[in-house]
Image: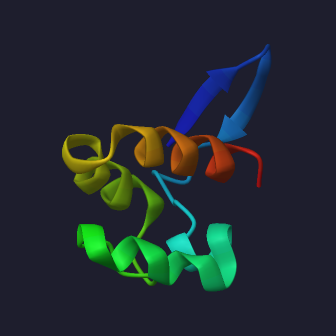
Amino acid sequence: MFCRYGGFFKLDVGGLMPLVVEVLGIHAHVLRRYGVLPDEEVGSAVAKLKAAAPHLAEFLREAASLQ
């Protein structure tokens, strides 16, 4: 599926998200206490963290956007 973005046509890959371990490295294991596994996609990890630790959810979302 193609989507229009910034005046150019760009391929929409359908929501591919990096893994938590790709964003945080070895520090991804700290999130296990919140039920987030290191090999989980960032999108689902953020959803899990929103209730228990919203500050970590926001941090993870921002860190993933920098990659």
Q: Nearer the viewer, residue 15 or 43?
A: 43
Give the side of residue 12 with respect to residue 8, left or right: left
Q: Residue at x 49, y 43 (%)?
A: 1
Residue 58, image x, y percentages: 49, 38
Query: Which of the 4 image quarters holds residue 3?
Result: top right
Classify 48 as above or below 6: below
Q: Quadrant of the C terminus?
A: bottom right
Q: Residue at x 39, y 53 (%)?
A: 43
The mark total stands at: 0
Residue 39, image x, y percentages: 44, 84
Q: Residue at x 28, y 42 (%)?
A: 50
Name the image colouring: rainbow
Q: Residue at x 79, y 13 (%)?
A: 7
Classify 28 as above or below 65: below
User: Extreme left residue here?
Assistant: 51
Query: Which of the 4 image quarters holds residue 13?
Result: bottom right
Residue 60, image x, y percentages: 54, 51
Give the side of residue 2 with respect to residue 41, left or right: right
Query: Which of the 4 image quarters holds residue 25?
Result: bottom right
Residue 27, image x, y percentages: 60, 77
